[in-house]
Amino acid sequence: MSVQTSVSNQNQVNVAFLEAFSHAWNSHDIDELMTFVTDNCVFHTAAGPGLQGSTFSGREAVRESFQLVWKNFPDAQWLDGEHFVSGDRAVSESTFCATKPDGSRIEARMVDVFTLHDGKIQVKNAFRKDRPAFFNSDR
């Protein structure tokens, strides 16, 4: 058995797992969402002051940062998802759609690059196109 196959079997993460993770995001269900991540999870946001955006480490910090996304964007959705898994890495590509507090809209393609461990997501590293926000009449 190859190392790649062994890692994949150990992780037990597949496209259906990533689709369910995406569904939890779109449902804004923090308890469900947290079932997909490890206790020592890390979240690198799409924006922030650091090279990796802003980084949140550990279950409680990641939980709070996920909830902050919904607080800042109460109608946030990740649409048109495409997913794949390769060994201990996975990728989800989607269109992030949300309304900013000033009423402008964000619609931009994005990807999450995941590092997997023991059948869960250990690292979620988010990347998003830097498209300017617009008002519905500006589209």
Image (cartoon, helix red, strand yellow):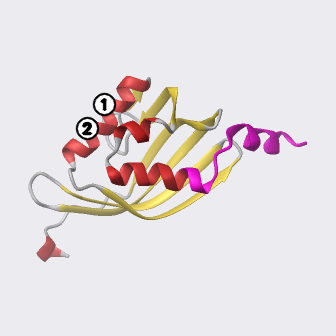
The structure residue drawn at horizontal position 79% and vertical position 43%, both measured from the top left corner, is 4
Q: Quadrant of residue 11?
A: top right
In this picture, residue 116 sits left or right of residue 137: right
Question: Residue 28 or 70: which is nearer the viewer?
Answer: 28
The local crowd at label 2, few if under 14, some if 14 to 19, many if 20 or more residues have their Cα within 10 Å, is few
| Label 1 element class | helix
In this picture, residue 66 sits left or right of residue 18: left
Which percent across, then down, holds residue 82? 53, 63
Judged from this view, the residue extending furthest toward the left is 102
**The C terminus is located in which quarter?**
bottom left
Q: CA distance from mark 1 to mark 2?
A: 6 Å
**Any part of residue 52 in sight:** no
Q: Which residue is mark 2?
A: 68
Which percent across, then down, holds residue 116? 61, 38
Which percent across, then down, holds residue 100? 16, 54
Q: Quadrant of residue 80?
A: bottom left
In this picture, residue 15 sits left or right of residue 78: right
In this picture, residue 85 sits left or right of residue 136: right
The magenta segment: 1-17
Q: Are marks 1 and 2 in contact (CB under 8 Å)?
A: yes
Q: Which residue is mark 1?
A: 64
Which percent across, then down, holds residue 43? 43, 35
Task: Considering the whole magenta stretch, tell me its main secondary structure.
Answer: helix
Q: Is residue 119 above or below residue 101?
A: above
Q: Amino acid at mark 2?
A: Leu
